[in-house]
Amino acid sequence: MKFFSKQIPVYFLFFAILISSLTTYFVVKSRFKSEIIDTNSVINTSTISNSCNVNFSRLKGRELIRPLLFAERTCEAEKFSSMKTSLTDLIQNLKTSGQINSASVYVRMFQNGEWINLNGEQKYMPGSLFKVPLLMTYLRMAEKDNSIMSKKYQFTQITEESKGLKQEFLKTQIKLGSSYTVKELMRYMIVHSDNNATMLLMNNIPMSEFEKTFTDMGMNKDLIKSDAVISAQEYSEFWLALFNGSYLSFDNSEFALRLLTESDFIDGIVKGIPKNIKIAHKFGEKGDSNKHGFHETGIVYLNNSPYLISVMTEGNDQNKLPAALKEISTVIYNNMESFNY
């Protein structure tokens, strides 16, 4: 009891408190630092080469913020070199046999951003592929005014623009004299690739809104012109923004991709992939009597490692091009499955 009854000098108490505070500071700092290191390891930074820079694509048009749309490595993935060789050989064989005249292929793994690009400088008229940015335009507008989705428009006549659009693989389309909500027209446009539904949607928004979707993505607004051309990699940026949920709200990004999983076209990249694998995809066709273009872009939800595939082709026979896409898709799927992510 005498020990507790002694008076402890003030300077001793001060010294003890100081030592205790410093000890606590360094322990907490050490623990916090280790947590940061553990968090970074989850990103698997060991797979990122020091010699490969990353380009960041950010949303345009805001005064004070630049939201991140997606990040892209500047160099191709070395681990995909064997797949690229196989695709190069396949494309050459398809050209030699006369099935295609040219092809461009872009493949990207979402998990770590690794990609390859074949004939990336080649550009094509997109055709119905641009129904996806039109869908994104309406969904962006609906985020400010949700009543847009329930607005009804009557299909009164087939426009000259729609008459001029090729649609070799049409199965379902809207009927003359009937009225449809914007949401219903979206389904016809994406699931059935109906050109009449597309033109009805196109004719009921200002062109500036459609242009904005392109300029927001850092693209030229002139891409909306009928004779514009785009590469497979450039077009894929719309899909990256949807998958990342970085342009539209999460709910609208999910809605758009769910519609794309319901596409009723199955003669292209879908045929090269097992039926139990979910795929969000959109095809496009464009051409004239001398040259036909057929393209398709999609996200293949392989296990927990989805990947994006974008293929653009040209050939003399429109009916032979989907089979070429199927062969290209098969090579990519087999390689992706073998990586066993």
Image (cartoon, rainbow, N blue to C red):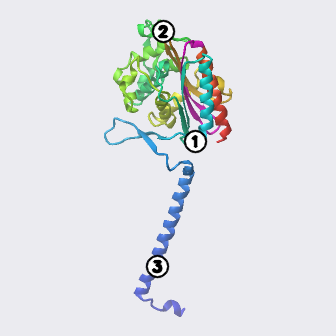
Residue that protrudes farthest toward the bottom in the picture? 2
Identity of the amino acid at label 1? Glu
Question: Where is mark 2, residue-wise?
Answer: 178
Dominant secondary structure of the magenta stretch?
A: strand
Q: What is the quadrant of residue 56 in the picture?
A: top left
Residue placed under numbered mark 3 in the picture = 19
Mark earlier in primary sequence (2, 1): 1
Q: CA distance from mark 1 to mark 3?
A: 53 Å
Q: As drawn, which residue projects farthest toward the left?
A: 63
Circle 2 crowding by C-alpha within 10 Å: few under 14, some 14–19, many from 20: few
The answer to whether marks 1 and 3 mark residues whose Cβ atoms lie closer than 8 Å is no
Q: Find residue 9 and report its horizontal and vertical position in percent.
A: 42, 89
In the displayed orientation, state which residue is furthest to the front.
96
Mark 3 is on which residue type? Ile
Neighbor class of circle 1 (other Cα within 10 Å; few <14, some 14-19, many 20+) is few
Region rendered in magenta = 297-319
Nearer the viewer's eye, disc 2 or disc 1?
1
